[in-house]
Image (tube, rainbow, N blue to C red):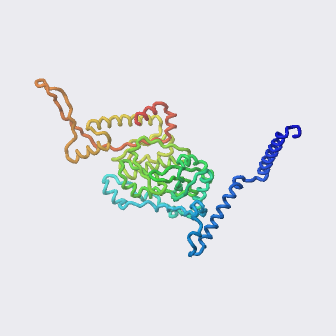
Amino acid sequence: ATLLPEGVAGWTVFGTGACCLIAGCVITGRVFAIDWSMLFSLPRALGRDRAVAAAAARDAAPAHAAPDERAAPLPRATITAEEPRKPPEIVDPTSPAKPAKFLGTDRQKDLFDEYDLPSLDLLNDPAPDSGQKIDKLSLERNARLLETVLDDFNVKGEITAVRTGPVVTMYELEPAPGIKASRVIGLADDIARNMSAISARVSSIPGRTVMGIELPNADRQMVSFKEMVSSEAFVNHKGMLPIILGKDIAGEPVVADLATMPHLLVAGTTGSGKSVGLNCILLSLLYRLTPQQCRLILVDPKVLELKSYDDIPHLLSPVVTDPGKAVRALKWAVEEMEKRYRMMSEISVRNLASFNEKVRTAAAKGKPLGRRVQIGFDPDTGEEIYEENQLDYQALPQIVLIVDELADLMITVGKEIEVLIQRLS
């Protein structure tokens, strides 16, 4: 510094000292892991504590103190005490599905004189301990743990309700304002990992402000088919081909109409329950519909799942196990489909339900169906000549074609089976 001019030397010494001081502070902070943000917030925290103490002293002041001697009211932001969060609502699982009022042999015989539907006595009763035992303390603890997991990913919110089901439990999350639903949905894998679950499903609940987070139960509840087939939801279902699918998240029976989804493909990994679902669909049809209402074509190339249905009266043919016969069965189905389209066109209807209704109405009135057809022109007047054709039609049953192991059949037969399936669909 002695070699520099007097003015420059002073500034040089000052700059060097400042740099050394800053470097020393940084090194000291790194060595002792000092949290500078907390250190800088100490004055504000101390001021907040003094403000709270002043508020407490003001509240303890005598009531006869002069108004001007009291301190100004503190803003609401200075109050740090948080209200205790109320526990989530634990929704008990529903009781077993309510059985229909009129079930049994008497009702079935009154409805169908020529054919009796299978009796419920053929099915096993549900296990007496199949009811799910709910542990509210454990569910509340899981709800708080889920809130903590979400908070670790900067997703603020509160679990407002917990709904237990036979297989999964749904936690209803009320996100804080400004939290996007897509952000929560994208955390499904992280939620499953942090909750030690096999998987997790996150979705918005239509019509509500909450989001549903579904986690699998440690102990799954067995769903009894006898309970489902005797429930009001199945017996009173208005569909043409009602099928039982199981229970929903609330434990209520889920019944669908196969007629509204005529081209159904069931897929899944080994052991995921495809065969159980297929048998459930078949038994639903057998317990609800007579052979006059529904006919079946079953194709089972592996001779494993469907061969036990070989003697039921609903079959149009024995269970098909040969790939070549399966092709012929599908060709017959295509021809039958085209034939039915022509029949519906002749009486001006668009679907099988309208066709059967029109046929039954004509039979009840004792007047056969007819179709007015133009056969030519009058040679003298040139007017059109019509003829009434009598149509001797009967009510047609629904035809359900079920193919087990479709992939194996397509590999064995090849393109021919693909073309037939495309025609049917």
> What residue appears at the point 40 percent right and 60 percent down from the top-left corner?
99
Q: Is residue 26 visible?
A: yes
Q: Residue lying at the far left in this picture: please name it.
A: 380
Relative height, residue 242 to residue 106 (above, below): above
Relative height, residue 250 to residue 392 (above, below): below
Is residue 92 left or right of 328 when viewed as pictured?
Answer: right
Picture quadrant of residue 103: bottom left
Quadrant housing the C terminus: top left
Q: Give the x, y percent position of residue 101.
A: 36, 62
> What residue appears at the point 40 percent right and 56 percent down from the top-left corner?
233
Is residue 94 left or right of 364 when viewed as pictured?
Answer: right
Q: Is residue 167 visible?
A: no
Q: Give the x, y percent position of residue 27.
A: 79, 48
Is residue 251 left or right of 15 when viewed as pictured?
Answer: left
| Number of dots carrying numbers | 0
Quadrant housing the N terminus: top right
> What residue appears at the point 57 percent right and 69 percent down from the top-left corner?
68
Q: Give the x, y percent position of residue 397.
A: 34, 44
